[in-house]
Amino acid sequence: MVDPSVEIAGLRLTSPLLLASGTVGYGPEYDGLVDFGKVGAIVTKTVTPEPRAGNAPPRLAETRGGMLNSIGLENVGLERFLSDKLSEAAKLPTRVIASVAGKSATEFANLCGAIGERDETAGLELNISCPNVERARLPLWADPAGVAEVVSAARRATAKPLFLKLSPNAADVLSVAEAGEKAGADALVVGNTLPGMRIDVETRAPMLGNRFGGLSGPALKPVNLALVWRLSAGVGIPIVGSGGIERTEDALEYLLAGATAFQVGTAIFRTPSVVGRIIDGLAQRAATDGINSLTGYTGLAKEVETPCQRTRAD
Amino acid sequence: MPSATSLLLACRPQTPFDSAEPGQFVHVDTGRERAFRRPFSVAGLTDDGAVELLIELRGEGTRTLAELPVGSSLAMMGPLGNGFRLPPAGSHAAVVAGGIGVAGVRHLVQRLESAGVDTTVYVGARTADALLHGVLPRPSDARVATDDGSAGMRGTVCDLFATGAGALAPDTTVYGCGPRPMLDTLAAVAARSHLACQVSLEEMMACGVGACRGCVVPTVDGYRTVCKDGPVFDASMLVAAERTMEVARG
């Protein structure tokens, strides 16, 4: 059996599978349902400086091939995260990456400093990309200068690995990624949800209380997969692929496109046991393929001629 | 079938449920076409360890379940959530169910029955065909109401309950399950009569275990999850849905 452990952003993780922020709560909610021994790290619910009540319900809608959420970063706030949630999460047999979001670079830095100094914290994920929170001027996820400022401030506040979670909604994601890399991010998470909505044809009203929500699930996968392909050619830091992974083959596609690790989120709602199946499936596949580490798959698709290129060469 | 648009399923878990509190639910996978599982109240536990679900054929998820051949396997998590609290010994109970809300109180009525609690049951539906009191113990004792008057009193189950609420013993605990507007009305009637009231809510859920915060309802203590904090709440905790929407949008 192939050892599924990977090294990313200076962290040695038992597997390349991370559980995506927002889907796994603070971790213990899924105790007994998810095989945490096969999870490289959980990414917690995003923490903000103060507690947040979140958006007005309804907050969920199903779509063809996925779902919409407009939770609005409901969370317990920094103080309770530090006093309760972080140490409870750390009892699980996996690593803990804390997702953080602030309204300013200073807030991001304060969150990273306070959470990063705790031994339980393996790393921090900078959530610059939540589609459910308004920002006055240009959204942060589309603003390379704003992102550079946030990442630099976070970098000064902690020595722990920084994962920058990008939005597929930015017109120029590469510029945002490059700004993040230059400012000191250790890895990119590619990426968050896409904005979307549904309307109830009976009531003629938007199904979500916040009208718009983030689209996740299989429908998102081709979008973020293409971004991983493009960004992995343009940046030097490792990429964590995320969006619509629910099977071994989905995860493998992200690795082949250039990801070093990947996140699973929406899929655990329907099938918490998918975690074990994906990792076991990858390890078996690697054994068959004669690849002795899962990182051996990273970017392999770029070395293969596409059918189209072959035709042209002929 | 208990009615034209519902079905009683018996599911035998691989790991038998030791127990399920009345009002708890199971989270059922209805296939990969749908991102979310579907929450169903545990409508009863049989002596041989089966979990009974009373399911209204409402959408694609429930139709998928209805079309499963006998003997099929289902992925099911549970029992989940906080159920009904039984009334103090020697006191009275009133159970009020609208439409498929009977599913949420059937196990409760069974437990009240076996505990010997003096219980009055009120069941409502749009029409006589849709009435589900037939799946309850002693169905002929249930008081019924239909919107079109095709069985029992013409009106809603809350109208029916309100006509006799004043005559209920002051130590009566009122239990409700049904559509949210019905439960808000029921809560108001119970409050007017100074009766304790617990209601079981339904919301679309993603995780079912309190992680995603998707199924929240507004309460006097802020947003609470239906899956983990509920599905049963003290009616006095709840804030009517329209009011918070105004505040949130205002």
Image (cartoon, rainbow, N blue to C red):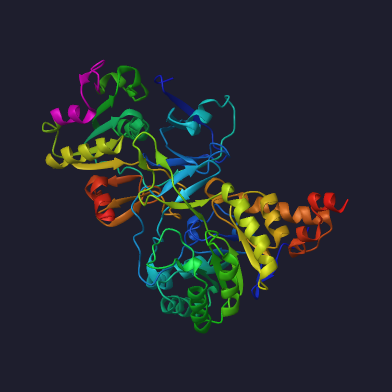
Give whichever of A109, B147 is nearer the camera.
Answer: A109
Q: Which residues are magenta?
A: B145-164
Front one among B185 and B175:
B185
The residue lying toward the viewer, choosing from B164 and A128, is: A128
Side of A71 relative to A215 (left or right)? left
Q: Is residue B170 left or right of residue A183?
A: left
From what the image shows, is residue A227 above or below residue A176? above
Coordinates of residue B88 in the picture (x, y in percent): 24, 43
What residue do we see at 34% from left, 60% from top? A53
The x, y position of residue A65, in whole percent, is 56, 43
* Residue at the image position 57 percent from the left and 24 percent from the top: B70
Say left or right for A183 vs B3: right
Q: Quadrant of residue A101?
A: bottom left
Q: Residue at the far bottom: name it.
A: A156
Image quarter of residue A106: bottom left
- A301 versus A9 height, above or below: above
Residue under the point 47% across and 56% down? A29
Side (left or right) of A121 relative to A197: right
Q: Position of residue A83 (x, y in %)?
A: 41, 72
What is the count of numbered marks? 0
**Residue B4's x, y, as percent?**
41, 19
